[in-house]
Amino acid sequence: MSSDGNSFLKSLFFGQVREDLIFPYPQLSDDVSETVSMVGDAIGKFADEHIESEKWDKDAAMPREIVDLCSEMGLMGILVDEEHNGLGLPMMAYARIFEELGKYDTSLTVTVGAHQSIGYKALLLFGNEEQNARYLPKLATGEMIAAFCLTEPSSGSDAASIKTKAVPTEDGSDYIITGSKLWITNGGIADFFTVFAKVEVGEGDEKKEKVTCFVVEAAWEGITVGPPEEKMGIKASWTNEVHFQDVKVPAANIVGDVGKGFKVAMGILNHGRMGLAGGCISGIKNCIKASLEHATERKQFNKKLIEFEMIQEKIAVMAVNLYAAEAMGYVTADLIDKGDVDYSMESAAAKIFATEALWDACDENLQIWGGLGFMKEYPFERWVRDVRIFRIFEGTNEVLRAFIALSGMQGPGESLAGLAEAIKYPLKGLGPVTDFAVRKIKRSILGASVENAHPAVKQIVGVFEEGTTEFADQVEATLRKYGKKIFLKQFAQKRIADIAIDLFGLACVISRATTAIEKKGVEKCTLELELAHSFAHMAKRRIHSNFRGFQKNDDDALQDIALSLADIGKYPFDILN
């Protein structure tokens, strides 16, 4: 295995294309598709009978029995195997079911998602047989509701800085946990907490505090839950502080090894983002449907809104972004299902793209509805409030961009480090120099290549191949320019990440369009090809803009402005003075 590992996006940072990971475009098997369809029908019937989004938003609460009804439909154990009372479905099916649930109410989707996307995901990914046998059957049926306890008052995106402590008892059979967790979704109804706390561990002659993952039952002594938080959106979901005061937790409830909790937390979040992406897809579909409804009925200046080009542009861009978001989301879900594939960067890219596409769609839909969209008589202002959290949930998009850039550059950085060592010791370093040189020469002569794409998407393939080759060169140039200081250079990180996201989107769109053409023929894929080519044009413009930004930008000026304002504490100019 090369230093880029078994990862599509990490390979792109070397200018290599792992077609085997994205072709053919994934499809659900017939039996799984039938199950998903049945679950979708059940969700639709349930929504018609029980979901009251407007009332729940006004009351800032939903009835507790709504969660029980979701449990009865099997929605609490979609990925859990049948042996432990779950549906035993793959990740692609999970994302598709969440897309269906997301049509109806965001607060409920968040509640169900927080339970299994992150709440007990530690057990699915890292739990041992005893832990899984003890807890998964109750979690899969909703007898126990789960919550994920990572964020603290002084620790948000910086998970390693948590203050909650876990101290072993003298005989080591238990740990005593003390600390507080903030903004815990499902905190008010949870019976089961996945809790992250720091444990003092020995490293040679030193002792260091390292994050460790525990599963904790809410009924245990010392746990108190704060009142519901007042929020901008998703008001009907339960969000509370959870306090742990000298809570005795058996050592048998450690998930993974002592001191390995950060790895567990990141694994959960990487995996869990796919449910969020599914919810975003359904949200964009809702926006397109609502926008079309108004644009084809509302008249202004003796014309229907849909006849105006600015309105056409808004709706078309929503559809183009949706096509790409679906492609990225389901390719990533399939990467998870493949097993033994590093999907961490792909899940971050899919989450970033989908949440930002959804935000734009909600904003533009409200704009199309005009003043009506601003009124509570319609659901659109609620949609805007509800989805704003998605760019913050499960890793802020800014942190995830830094993660994509730095994780992707790690492999090329190691190659450059080998090159530097080789220059210092020429004979000793002959191997690293040769490997790096061969990789670079191959890229410069042959470029990146895609062989499995249909000829009808040749133009999109050209955009992708050209961008991938230039991207790898830019990654190398950026690393040479900044060296280890790249960790501090977030303007560069953002550009690198945004290019990587667009390249991943292009690859997924190529795969999706190719499979569609192979199944239906070119003549029946006219609209799909227009969506694919439009995404390629938009992505190409963004990619070229980011490449130009490395050479010509106002980064220093923006940094100076921000720091100057920080020193002053306000915008200092007044037209009257």
Image (cartoon, rainbow, N blue to C red):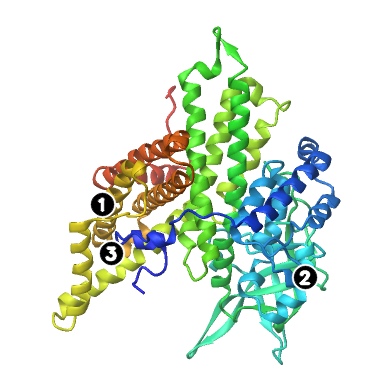
Helix, strand or loop at label 3? It is helix
Q: For residue 171, what is the image quadrant?
A: bottom right
Give the foreground label among 2 and 3: 2
Look at label 1 and name its amino acid: Glu
Q: Closer to the camera, 332 or 142?
A: 332
In the depicted structure, whether residue 422 falls above or below residue 559: below
Mark closest to the chain's N terminus, 3 or 1: 1
Query: 207 or 113: which is nearer to us?
Result: 113
**Eye-nearest disc, 2 or 1:** 2
The mark total stands at: 3
Q: At 34% from the left edge and 72% from the top edge, which residue is drawn?
A: 2
The type of residue carrying mark 3 is Gly
* Mark number, residue 483: 3
Q: Position of residue 101 (x, y in %)?
A: 69, 47
Q: Which mark is residue 91?
A: none
Q: Residue at x 50, y 55 (%)?
A: 331
Residue at the (71%, 91%) spot, across then down: 170
Measured Cα–Cα span from mark 2 to mark 1: 50 Å
Residue named by callout 2: 137
Quadrant of the image containing the N terminus: bottom left
Q: Is residue 513 above or below residue 468?
A: above
Viewer can see residue 409: yes
Disc 2 residue type?
Pro
On the image, the x and y values in percent for residue 105 come to: 71, 42
Residue tagged 1: 470
Position in image of residue 316 (x %, y %): 48, 30
| Residue 34 picture location, percent across and down | 68, 53
Measured Cα–Cα span from mark 3 to mark 1: 19 Å
